[in-house]
Image: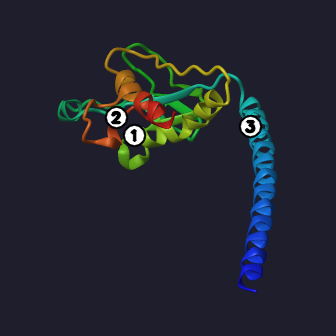
Amino acid sequence: RAAETKLKEMTDFVSKTKELEESNDRLHVSLQDETEKRKAIHNTLEDLKGRIRVYVRVRPLSENEVKANYVSVMSKEDDRTCVMARDVATATDERDWEFDKIFYGSDVDGNTQENVFKDTSLLITSAIDGFNVCIFAYGQTGSGKTYTMLGSGDVDNQGHQGLAPRVAHEL
């Protein structure tokens, strides 16, 4: 009788194992389908945003610049518009430009390495999905290109890591 009971338990166990394997296979196929849907939706969203996006990051004045009473000639009008002040010396009128995103001010204002990465991280997802992606920094000497792309070089301060180390970590 004990042997029959053990045999029934083993048969039930094998049956449940097969059911779990079948369920696991169905879930795996479902996951693959959902992953493909996510990729398609993500890339449709990225296409709607446009193939080329232009972000601007305005470096805050350094301590030395503040001590020397320099003033920033750039201001942020809204999340997409950056304004250059009128220059009396050169008789240049105020000018404004529109961007996809503006990072302006100090860390307190949200001009952080983390926020720049968050805003560009969807491009990383596109790269992982197999699409070509290019991020480059352009600007005048001392404008913060290297800091934005690589960070401060302080390995102990993860908050100051640039895009490249964050992207490498993400991949």
- First along the sequence among labels 1 and 2: 2
- Real-space Cα distance between discs 2 and 3? 37 Å
Residue 124: x and y, percent? 58, 32
Image quadrant of residue 152? top left
Q: Residue at x 39, y 20 (%)?
A: 88
What's the residue at 39%, 40% (across, down)? Answer: 105
Q: Residues within 10 Å of mark 2 (few under 14, many from 20)?
A: some
Give the residue at mark 3. Answer: 39
Q: Residue, x 41% and y 21% (percent of image)?
A: 87
Whole-percent x and y of residue 109?
Answer: 41, 47
- Secondary structure at badge 2 equals loop
| Lower position in the chain sequence, tag 2 or tag 3 | 3
Asked if the residues shown at circle 2 and circle 3 are in contact, with their CB atoms under 8 angstroms apart, the answer is no
Q: Nearer the viewer, residue 99 or 132?
A: 132
Left or right side of 52 for 57: left
Callout 1 crowding tier (Cα within 10 Å): few <14, some 14–19, many ≥20? some
When asked about the image quadrant of residue 155, the answer is top left
| Total numbered labels placed on residues in the image | 3
Q: Nearer the viewer, residue 117 or 78?
A: 117
Asked if labels 2 and 1 touch by Cβ distance under 8 angstroms, the answer is: yes
Residue behind mark 1: 105
Q: Which residue is mark 2?
A: 60
Q: Quadrant of the N terminus?
A: bottom right
- The three-letter code of the residue at mark 2 reads Pro
Label 3's element?
Answer: helix
Q: Residues within 10 Å of mark 3 (few under 14, many from 20)?
A: some
Q: Which mark, residue 166?
A: none
